[in-house]
Amino acid sequence: MKFCSQCGTDNIRWEVPDGDNRPRHICGGCNEIHYQNPKIVVGCIPEWEDTVLLCRRAIEPRYGYWTLPAGFMENDETTSEAAERETLEEANARVELLGLYTVMNIPHTNQVYMMFRSRLLDLEFGPGTESLEVKLFREHEIPWRELAFPTIVHTLELYFEERRKAQFGVHLGDIVRESHRGVFIPRRQRD
Amino acid sequence: MKFCSQCGTDNIRWEVPDGDNRPRHICGGCNEIHYQNPKIVVGCIPEWEDTVLLCRRAIEPRYGYWTLPAGFMENDETTSEAAERETLEEANARVELLGLYTVMNIPHTNQVYMMFRSRLLDLEFGPGTESLEVKLFREHEIPWRELAFPTIVHTLELYFEERRKAQFGVHLGDIVRESHRGVFIPRRQRD
Protein backbone atom coordinates (compact mmCIF):
# COMPACT_ATOMS: atom_id res chain seq x y z
CA MET A 1 0.00 0.00 0.00
CA LYS A 2 1.60 3.24 -1.21
CA PHE A 3 -1.38 5.65 -1.10
CA CYS A 4 -4.43 5.91 1.18
CA SER A 5 -7.50 4.57 -0.65
CA GLN A 6 -9.70 6.97 1.36
CA CYS A 7 -7.87 10.34 1.04
CA GLY A 8 -5.13 9.72 -1.57
CA THR A 9 -2.13 10.86 0.50
CA ASP A 10 1.18 8.97 0.32
CA ASN A 11 1.72 9.65 4.04
CA ILE A 12 1.24 5.99 5.07
CA ARG A 13 2.92 4.65 8.20
CA TRP A 14 3.46 0.99 9.14
CA GLU A 15 2.78 1.16 12.88
CA VAL A 16 0.87 -0.45 15.72
CA PRO A 17 -2.36 1.58 16.17
CA ASP A 18 -3.41 2.63 19.70
CA GLY A 19 -5.08 -0.26 21.48
CA ASP A 20 -3.86 -2.76 18.89
CA ASN A 21 -0.96 -5.19 19.12
CA ARG A 22 0.31 -5.55 15.56
CA PRO A 23 1.45 -3.13 12.85
CA ARG A 24 -1.02 -1.89 10.19
CA HIS A 25 -0.95 0.59 7.32
CA ILE A 26 -2.12 3.82 9.01
CA CYS A 27 -2.91 6.96 7.00
CA GLY A 28 -1.17 10.08 8.33
CA GLY A 29 -3.75 12.24 6.48
CA CYS A 30 -7.16 10.88 7.50
CA ASN A 31 -6.09 8.37 10.21
CA GLU A 32 -7.76 5.47 8.38
CA ILE A 33 -6.35 2.08 9.44
CA HIS A 34 -6.03 -0.30 6.49
CA TYR A 35 -6.41 -3.89 7.65
CA GLN A 36 -5.20 -6.86 5.61
CA ASN A 37 -6.62 -10.31 6.29
CA PRO A 38 -6.31 -13.85 4.92
CA LYS A 39 -8.29 -14.84 1.85
CA ILE A 40 -10.44 -17.94 1.47
CA VAL A 41 -9.86 -20.32 -1.44
CA VAL A 42 -12.80 -22.64 -2.06
CA GLY A 43 -13.08 -25.65 -4.35
CA CYS A 44 -14.19 -29.25 -4.60
CA ILE A 45 -13.29 -32.83 -5.50
CA PRO A 46 -15.75 -33.69 -8.30
CA GLU A 47 -16.20 -37.46 -8.35
CA TRP A 48 -17.68 -39.68 -11.06
CA GLU A 49 -17.76 -43.41 -10.30
CA ASP A 50 -14.14 -44.28 -9.37
CA THR A 51 -12.64 -41.14 -10.94
CA VAL A 52 -12.10 -37.51 -9.94
CA LEU A 53 -11.97 -34.50 -12.21
CA LEU A 54 -8.79 -32.42 -12.44
CA CYS A 55 -8.04 -29.24 -14.39
CA ARG A 56 -4.70 -28.34 -15.99
CA ARG A 57 -3.96 -24.69 -15.23
CA ALA A 58 -3.86 -22.16 -18.08
CA ILE A 59 -2.74 -19.40 -15.68
CA GLU A 60 0.12 -18.60 -13.34
CA PRO A 61 1.10 -19.57 -10.74
CA ARG A 62 1.80 -23.20 -11.70
CA TYR A 63 0.83 -22.91 -15.36
CA GLY A 64 0.47 -26.40 -16.89
CA TYR A 65 0.10 -28.19 -13.52
CA TRP A 66 -3.01 -30.12 -12.49
CA THR A 67 -5.39 -28.96 -9.79
CA LEU A 68 -8.86 -29.45 -8.37
CA PRO A 69 -11.30 -26.70 -9.38
CA ALA A 70 -10.86 -23.94 -6.76
CA GLY A 71 -10.47 -20.19 -6.47
CA PHE A 72 -10.93 -17.13 -4.30
CA MET A 73 -14.27 -16.83 -2.56
CA GLU A 74 -16.08 -13.63 -3.60
CA ASN A 75 -18.12 -11.15 -1.60
CA ASP A 76 -21.89 -11.80 -1.53
CA GLU A 77 -21.58 -15.57 -1.78
CA THR A 78 -21.35 -18.58 0.51
CA THR A 79 -18.55 -21.14 0.53
CA SER A 80 -20.86 -23.68 -1.14
CA GLU A 81 -21.80 -21.22 -3.88
CA ALA A 82 -18.12 -20.39 -4.39
CA ALA A 83 -17.21 -24.09 -4.78
CA GLU A 84 -19.98 -24.61 -7.36
CA ARG A 85 -19.08 -21.41 -9.23
CA GLU A 86 -15.36 -22.21 -9.45
CA THR A 87 -16.14 -25.71 -10.75
CA LEU A 88 -18.39 -24.24 -13.42
CA GLU A 89 -15.87 -21.56 -14.40
CA GLU A 90 -12.78 -23.77 -14.55
CA ALA A 91 -14.26 -27.02 -15.82
CA ASN A 92 -17.72 -26.13 -17.17
CA ALA A 93 -18.88 -28.82 -14.75
CA ARG A 94 -22.01 -29.02 -12.62
CA VAL A 95 -21.68 -30.69 -9.22
CA GLU A 96 -23.79 -31.58 -6.23
CA LEU A 97 -21.83 -30.80 -3.07
CA LEU A 98 -21.69 -33.66 -0.56
CA GLY A 99 -19.98 -31.95 2.36
CA LEU A 100 -17.07 -29.89 3.61
CA TYR A 101 -13.96 -32.06 3.48
CA THR A 102 -10.69 -30.20 4.20
CA VAL A 103 -9.90 -26.86 5.83
CA MET A 104 -6.21 -26.07 5.36
CA ASN A 105 -4.41 -22.99 6.64
CA ILE A 106 -1.45 -21.67 4.67
CA PRO A 107 -0.11 -18.95 6.99
CA HIS A 108 2.84 -18.06 4.71
CA THR A 109 0.49 -17.15 1.83
CA ASN A 110 -2.32 -15.80 4.05
CA GLN A 111 -4.85 -18.25 2.64
CA VAL A 112 -7.36 -20.71 4.06
CA TYR A 113 -8.39 -23.49 1.66
CA MET A 114 -11.83 -25.05 2.07
CA MET A 115 -12.46 -28.07 -0.15
CA PHE A 116 -15.76 -29.93 -0.52
CA ARG A 117 -16.50 -33.44 -1.68
CA SER A 118 -18.90 -33.38 -4.63
CA ARG A 119 -20.56 -35.52 -7.28
CA LEU A 120 -20.45 -34.61 -10.99
CA LEU A 121 -24.00 -34.31 -12.32
CA ASP A 122 -23.10 -35.16 -15.94
CA LEU A 123 -20.09 -35.61 -18.23
CA GLU A 124 -20.64 -32.41 -20.23
CA PHE A 125 -17.51 -30.76 -18.84
CA GLY A 126 -14.61 -29.06 -20.63
CA PRO A 127 -11.88 -26.47 -20.03
CA GLY A 128 -12.94 -22.97 -18.95
CA THR A 129 -10.74 -19.97 -19.80
CA GLU A 130 -8.38 -20.67 -16.87
CA SER A 131 -7.83 -24.34 -17.82
CA LEU A 132 -5.86 -25.98 -20.66
CA GLU A 133 -7.50 -29.35 -20.20
CA VAL A 134 -10.03 -31.06 -17.92
CA LYS A 135 -9.96 -34.81 -17.37
CA LEU A 136 -11.18 -37.66 -15.17
CA PHE A 137 -8.49 -39.67 -13.33
CA ARG A 138 -8.60 -43.00 -11.53
CA GLU A 139 -6.47 -43.11 -8.36
CA HIS A 140 -3.51 -44.83 -10.06
CA GLU A 141 -3.63 -42.30 -12.92
CA ILE A 142 -3.32 -39.17 -10.72
CA PRO A 143 -0.27 -37.14 -11.87
CA TRP A 144 1.03 -36.74 -8.29
CA ARG A 145 4.27 -35.03 -9.36
CA GLU A 146 2.42 -32.58 -11.58
CA LEU A 147 -0.12 -31.34 -9.03
CA ALA A 148 -0.13 -27.57 -8.63
CA PHE A 149 -0.28 -27.06 -4.85
CA PRO A 150 0.35 -28.92 -1.55
CA THR A 151 -3.32 -28.36 -0.58
CA ILE A 152 -4.37 -30.35 -3.65
CA VAL A 153 -1.89 -33.17 -2.99
CA HIS A 154 -2.97 -33.53 0.64
CA THR A 155 -6.70 -33.22 -0.07
CA LEU A 156 -6.47 -35.97 -2.70
CA GLU A 157 -4.33 -38.20 -0.45
CA LEU A 158 -6.89 -37.95 2.36
CA TYR A 159 -9.74 -38.50 -0.10
CA PHE A 160 -8.39 -41.73 -1.63
CA GLU A 161 -7.37 -43.09 1.79
CA GLU A 162 -10.87 -42.51 3.17
CA ARG A 163 -12.63 -43.64 0.00
CA ARG A 164 -11.15 -47.11 0.57
CA LYS A 165 -12.76 -47.12 4.04
CA ALA A 166 -15.95 -45.53 2.61
CA GLN A 167 -15.96 -43.11 5.54
CA PHE A 168 -15.23 -39.42 5.18
CA GLY A 169 -14.43 -37.00 8.00
CA VAL A 170 -13.78 -33.25 8.00
CA HIS A 171 -10.05 -32.48 8.19
CA LEU A 172 -8.51 -29.34 9.59
CA GLY A 173 -4.79 -28.67 9.46
CA ASP A 174 -1.95 -26.44 8.37
CA ILE A 175 0.37 -26.49 5.40
CA VAL A 176 3.85 -25.71 6.66
CA ARG A 177 7.04 -25.38 4.66
CA GLU A 178 9.62 -28.09 5.20
CA SER A 179 12.71 -27.54 3.04
CA HIS A 180 11.06 -27.02 -0.37
CA ARG A 181 7.89 -29.00 0.22
CA GLY A 182 4.54 -28.05 1.72
CA VAL A 183 3.73 -30.58 4.44
CA PHE A 184 0.26 -31.05 5.95
CA ILE A 185 0.07 -31.02 9.76
CA PRO A 186 -3.38 -32.26 10.78
CA ARG A 187 -5.15 -30.94 13.89
CA ARG A 188 -7.13 -33.84 15.27
CA GLN A 189 -10.69 -33.50 16.52
CA ARG A 190 -11.03 -34.48 20.20
CA ASP A 191 -13.94 -35.04 22.56
CA MET B 1 -12.31 2.93 -2.43
CA LYS B 2 -11.82 6.53 -3.59
CA PHE B 3 -8.11 6.54 -4.51
CA CYS B 4 -5.81 3.88 -5.96
CA SER B 5 -3.56 2.48 -3.22
CA GLN B 6 -0.83 1.81 -5.81
CA CYS B 7 -0.62 5.10 -7.76
CA GLY B 8 -2.80 7.57 -5.80
CA THR B 9 -5.12 8.65 -8.62
CA ASP B 10 -8.86 9.19 -7.98
CA ASN B 11 -9.62 7.80 -11.44
CA ILE B 12 -11.23 4.61 -10.14
CA ARG B 13 -13.86 2.79 -12.19
CA TRP B 14 -16.32 0.15 -10.97
CA GLU B 15 -16.31 -2.19 -13.97
CA VAL B 16 -16.01 -5.82 -15.02
CA PRO B 17 -12.33 -6.38 -15.97
CA ASP B 18 -11.51 -8.22 -19.23
CA GLY B 19 -11.86 -11.95 -18.76
CA ASP B 20 -13.69 -11.51 -15.45
CA ASN B 21 -17.42 -11.77 -14.75
CA ARG B 22 -18.04 -9.34 -11.90
CA PRO B 23 -17.34 -5.65 -11.27
CA ARG B 24 -14.18 -4.58 -9.42
CA HIS B 25 -12.50 -1.31 -8.52
CA ILE B 26 -10.15 -0.74 -11.49
CA CYS B 27 -7.56 2.04 -11.51
CA GLY B 28 -7.69 4.22 -14.65
CA GLY B 29 -4.10 5.36 -13.93
CA CYS B 30 -2.07 2.20 -13.41
CA ASN B 31 -4.72 -0.45 -14.36
CA GLU B 32 -4.45 -2.14 -10.95
CA ILE B 33 -7.53 -4.25 -10.15
CA HIS B 34 -8.49 -3.98 -6.47
CA TYR B 35 -10.19 -7.18 -5.31
CA GLN B 36 -12.36 -7.36 -2.21
CA ASN B 37 -13.00 -10.71 -0.55
CA PRO B 38 -14.82 -12.08 2.51
CA LYS B 39 -13.12 -11.99 5.88
CA ILE B 40 -12.78 -14.88 8.32
CA VAL B 41 -13.98 -14.49 11.91
CA VAL B 42 -12.55 -17.13 14.23
CA GLY B 43 -13.43 -17.95 17.82
CA CYS B 44 -14.28 -20.71 20.25
CA ILE B 45 -16.66 -22.08 22.85
CA PRO B 46 -14.53 -22.29 26.02
CA GLU B 47 -16.04 -24.95 28.27
CA TRP B 48 -15.42 -25.62 31.98
CA GLU B 49 -17.36 -28.52 33.48
CA ASP B 50 -21.02 -27.79 32.59
CA THR B 51 -20.45 -24.09 31.82
CA VAL B 52 -19.26 -22.03 28.87
CA LEU B 53 -17.44 -18.71 28.97
CA LEU B 54 -19.06 -15.62 27.43
CA CYS B 55 -17.76 -12.04 27.07
CA ARG B 56 -19.87 -8.87 27.29
CA ARG B 57 -18.78 -6.56 24.48
CA ALA B 58 -17.09 -3.24 25.33
CA ILE B 59 -17.06 -2.24 21.65
CA GLU B 60 -19.49 -1.61 18.82
CA PRO B 61 -21.26 -3.21 17.11
CA ARG B 62 -23.51 -4.69 19.80
CA TYR B 63 -21.90 -2.92 22.77
CA GLY B 64 -23.09 -4.51 26.02
CA TYR B 65 -24.27 -7.76 24.39
CA TRP B 66 -22.79 -11.17 25.19
CA THR B 67 -20.67 -13.15 22.77
CA LEU B 68 -18.22 -16.03 22.50
CA PRO B 69 -14.59 -14.89 22.18
CA ALA B 70 -14.04 -14.35 18.42
CA GLY B 71 -12.53 -11.87 16.00
CA PHE B 72 -10.97 -11.33 12.59
CA MET B 73 -8.29 -13.81 11.60
CA GLU B 74 -4.97 -12.04 10.94
CA ASN B 75 -2.34 -12.57 8.27
CA ASP B 76 0.51 -14.95 9.23
CA GLU B 77 -1.60 -17.11 11.52
CA THR B 78 -3.70 -20.26 11.34
CA THR B 79 -7.38 -20.52 12.29
CA SER B 80 -6.41 -22.40 15.47
CA GLU B 81 -3.90 -19.73 16.44
CA ALA B 82 -6.51 -17.04 15.75
CA ALA B 83 -9.07 -18.77 18.00
CA GLU B 84 -6.56 -19.04 20.86
CA ARG B 85 -5.36 -15.46 20.40
CA GLU B 86 -8.88 -13.97 20.38
CA THR B 87 -9.75 -15.92 23.54
CA LEU B 88 -6.64 -14.59 25.25
CA GLU B 89 -7.26 -10.99 24.08
CA GLU B 90 -10.96 -10.79 24.93
CA ALA B 91 -11.13 -12.95 28.05
CA ASN B 92 -7.51 -13.35 29.21
CA ALA B 93 -8.30 -17.04 28.99
CA ARG B 94 -6.14 -19.95 27.91
CA VAL B 95 -7.83 -22.80 26.08
CA GLU B 96 -7.01 -26.15 24.54
CA LEU B 97 -8.83 -26.44 21.20
CA LEU B 98 -10.83 -29.65 20.78
CA GLY B 99 -11.93 -29.33 17.17
CA LEU B 100 -13.56 -27.23 14.49
CA TYR B 101 -17.27 -27.00 15.28
CA THR B 102 -19.22 -24.53 13.10
CA VAL B 103 -18.49 -22.89 9.75
CA MET B 104 -21.14 -20.24 9.06
CA ASN B 105 -21.34 -18.07 5.96
CA ILE B 106 -22.82 -14.60 6.29
CA PRO B 107 -22.99 -13.45 2.66
CA HIS B 108 -24.66 -10.11 3.48
CA THR B 109 -21.70 -9.05 5.69
CA ASN B 110 -19.03 -10.86 3.63
CA GLN B 111 -17.87 -12.93 6.58
CA VAL B 112 -17.25 -16.59 7.26
CA TYR B 113 -17.36 -17.58 10.94
CA MET B 114 -15.30 -20.55 12.10
CA MET B 115 -15.90 -21.58 15.71
CA PHE B 116 -13.98 -24.26 17.61
CA ARG B 117 -14.91 -26.26 20.68
CA SER B 118 -12.34 -25.77 23.43
CA ARG B 119 -11.54 -26.49 27.06
CA LEU B 120 -10.53 -23.76 29.51
CA LEU B 121 -7.15 -24.61 31.03
CA ASP B 122 -7.72 -22.65 34.25
CA LEU B 123 -10.08 -20.13 35.85
CA GLU B 124 -7.67 -17.17 35.75
CA PHE B 125 -9.75 -15.31 33.15
CA GLY B 126 -11.02 -11.72 33.13
CA PRO B 127 -12.14 -9.00 30.71
CA GLY B 128 -9.67 -7.86 28.04
CA THR B 129 -9.88 -4.32 26.63
CA GLU B 130 -12.74 -5.25 24.28
CA SER B 131 -14.87 -6.83 27.03
CA LEU B 132 -16.86 -5.29 29.91
CA GLU B 133 -17.26 -8.57 31.73
CA VAL B 134 -16.38 -12.25 31.29
CA LYS B 135 -18.43 -14.98 32.95
CA LEU B 136 -19.19 -18.71 33.01
CA PHE B 137 -22.80 -19.70 32.20
CA ARG B 138 -24.70 -22.94 32.65
CA GLU B 139 -27.09 -23.74 29.80
CA HIS B 140 -30.18 -22.40 31.63
CA GLU B 141 -28.32 -19.19 32.52
CA ILE B 142 -27.38 -18.24 28.93
CA PRO B 143 -28.75 -14.72 28.18
CA TRP B 144 -30.28 -15.82 24.85
CA ARG B 145 -31.96 -12.47 24.18
CA GLU B 146 -28.77 -10.54 24.91
CA LEU B 147 -26.44 -12.47 22.59
CA ALA B 148 -24.61 -10.24 20.12
CA PHE B 149 -24.88 -12.12 16.82
CA PRO B 150 -26.92 -14.88 15.12
CA THR B 151 -23.72 -16.92 14.64
CA ILE B 152 -23.28 -17.00 18.43
CA VAL B 153 -26.92 -17.98 19.05
CA HIS B 154 -26.82 -20.82 16.51
CA THR B 155 -23.37 -22.09 17.54
CA LEU B 156 -24.50 -22.28 21.20
CA GLU B 157 -27.83 -23.93 20.27
CA LEU B 158 -26.02 -26.65 18.32
CA TYR B 159 -23.47 -27.05 21.10
CA PHE B 160 -25.97 -27.60 23.92
CA GLU B 161 -28.10 -29.91 21.76
CA GLU B 162 -25.08 -32.08 20.93
CA ARG B 163 -23.61 -31.91 24.42
CA ARG B 164 -26.70 -33.74 25.65
CA LYS B 165 -25.95 -36.52 23.15
CA ALA B 166 -22.21 -36.29 23.95
CA GLN B 167 -21.49 -36.39 20.22
CA PHE B 168 -20.18 -33.40 18.30
CA GLY B 169 -20.13 -33.02 14.51
CA VAL B 170 -18.80 -30.25 12.28
CA HIS B 171 -21.60 -27.97 11.07
CA LEU B 172 -21.56 -25.94 7.88
CA GLY B 173 -24.34 -23.55 6.96
CA ASP B 174 -25.45 -20.05 6.10
CA ILE B 175 -26.91 -17.22 8.14
CA VAL B 176 -29.68 -15.68 6.06
CA ARG B 177 -31.86 -12.72 6.93
CA GLU B 178 -35.51 -13.51 7.59
CA SER B 179 -37.46 -10.34 8.47
CA HIS B 180 -35.24 -8.90 11.23
CA ARG B 181 -33.65 -12.13 12.43
CA GLY B 182 -30.61 -14.06 11.25
CA VAL B 183 -31.67 -17.65 10.63
CA PHE B 184 -29.22 -20.54 10.28
CA ILE B 185 -29.70 -22.81 7.25
CA PRO B 186 -27.59 -25.95 7.71
CA ARG B 187 -25.96 -27.74 4.75
CA ARG B 188 -25.98 -31.40 5.61
CA GLN B 189 -23.01 -33.70 5.02
CA ARG B 190 -23.85 -36.58 2.67
CA ASP B 191 -22.05 -39.74 1.56
Image (spheres, coloured by chain):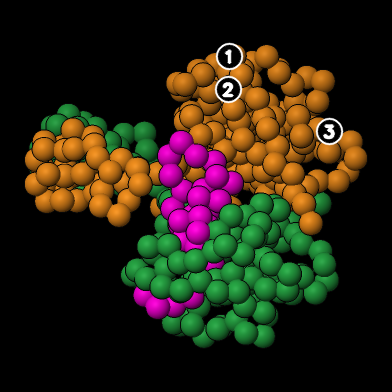
Chain colours: A orange, B green
User: Where does residue B51 sit, x and y in percent of width and height?
Assistant: 67, 73
Residue B121, magenta (yes or no): no
Distance from Cα at disc 3 to Cα at disc 1: 25 Å
User: Where does residue A167 sit, x and y in percent of width and height?
Assistant: 86, 46
The image quarter containing residue A103 is: top right
A125 w.r.t. B25: above or below: above
A79 w.r.t. B124: above or below: above
Q: Earlier in the sequence, mark 3 or mark 1?
A: 3
Along the viewing direction, whichever of B90 and A187 lies nearer the viewer? B90
Do marks 3 and 2 share a subunit?
yes
> Looking at the image, which residue sits at the far front?
B124
Q: Which disc, if any, is residue A177?
A: 2
Please state which of the two labelled residues, at mark 3 or mark 1, is closer to the viewer.
1
Along the viewing direction, whichever of A114 and B21 lies nearer the viewer? A114
Q: Residues within 10 Å of mark 3 (few under 14, many from 20)?
A: few
Instruction: Write down the residue under mark 1.
Output: A180
What stretch of residues is rendered in magenta? B63-92
Residue B86, magenta (yes or no): yes
Q: Are marks 3 and 2 in contact (CB under 8 Å)?
A: no
Residue at figure coordinates x 43%, y 39% from the top left: B75
Q: Are marks 1 and 2 in contact (CB under 8 Å)?
A: yes
Left or right: B50 as drawn, with respect to A115:
right
Task: Give the chain letter at badge 2.
Answer: A
Along the viewing direction, whichever of A8 and B53 lies nearer the viewer? B53
Q: Quadrant of the C terminus of chain A?
A: bottom right
Do marks 3 and 1 share a subunit?
yes
Disc 2 residue type (three-letter):
Arg
Q: Earlier in the sequence, mark 3 or mark 2?
A: 3
Residue at figure coordinates x 72%, y 31% from the top left: A156
Do marks 1 and 2 share a subunit?
yes
Task: Give the chain letter at badge 1.
Answer: A
